[in-house]
Image: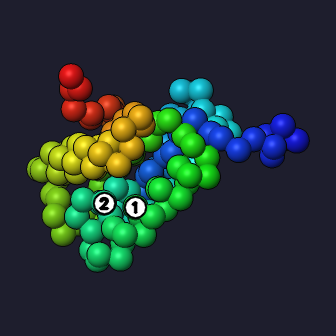
Amino acid sequence: MAGLIGRSKCSALLITCSDFRFQSTARKYVETHGLVDDYDVIARPGGIRSLVLPRSAAMRESMELEIRLLWSLHGFNDILFMNHVSCRAYDDIATEVNEIDVHTQHLRSAEKLVEGWFATIDVQPHLMMALDGEIVVADVGASKP
C-alpha cells in the first residue's frame, strides 16, 4: 500500500455513467485490461454526454476542467469512455431503435474532441450493452489512420 500511495502517475482515466447497474462491468473491464489501482474515474449521469450534448454549458465546462485537472495531476496516457444502453440521461434523445447509433456518435465525437486537447493521449470509446443476458463492453472507436 505504501508504494501505491507514493505514486503520482496512473495509466488511464475512465469516464463512465454514474448508473449503479454498470459499475461492476466497467470496473471488471478496466481491471482485466491491466489497470488494477491504475486509473482515475469520472462518473456522471450520461457518461460523456456532458462533452458533446450537455444539458448546460456548466456541465461541459466542469467535465473539461475535471479531465484536464486529473491529467495534470496524474499524467495518464489513455482515456476510456464507457457509455451504456438504457441510459436514462439519454431518454430525451435516444430510443430503443436508435440508442446504439446515438451513443456511438457521441462517443466518437467525444473521442475527436479530447484527442484535440491532448495530442499524445489514446482515447478508447466503448459501449456497454446486453448480449445473451450478460452486459458486454464493445469498442466503438472510429478507425484511426
Q: Residue furthest right?
A: 2
Mark 2 or mark 1, whichever is nearer to me: 1
At mark 2, the secondary structure is: helix
Residue at the spot of label 2: 51
Three-letter amino acid code of the residue under disc 1: Glu
Disc 2/disc 1 C-alpha distance (Å)? 7 Å
Q: Relative to 126, is 142 on the left or the right?
A: left
Residue 80 appears in the picture as rendered: no
The quarter of the picture where the N terminus appears is top right
Residue at position x 43%, y 52% in the image: 16
81 or 133, which lies in front? 81
Q: Position of residue 103 (x, y in %)?
A: 23, 49
Vertical relation: 140 (above or below) 66: above
50 or 84, which lies in front? 50
Q: Position of residue 141 (x, y in %)?
A: 27, 33
Residue at the spot of label 1: 64
Give the label on residue 25, or none.
none
Three-letter amino acid code of the residue under disc 2: Leu
Residue at position x 54%, y 27% in the image: 33
Q: Which of the two labelled residues, at mark 2 and mark 1, occupies the earlier sequence position? A: 2
Vertical relation: 42 (above or below) 92: above
At mark 1, the secondary structure is: helix
49 or 19, which lies in front? 49
Q: Position of residue 35 (x, y in %)?
A: 60, 33
Q: Position of residue 43 (x, y in %)?
A: 48, 58
> Residue 19 lies in what quarter of the image?
bottom left
Q: Are marks 2 and 1 in contact (CB under 8 Å)?
A: yes
Q: Relative to 11, is 65 on the left or the right?
A: left
Residue at position x 22%, y 64% in the image: 53
The quarter of the picture where the C terminus appears is top left
Vertical relation: 87 (above or below) 116: below
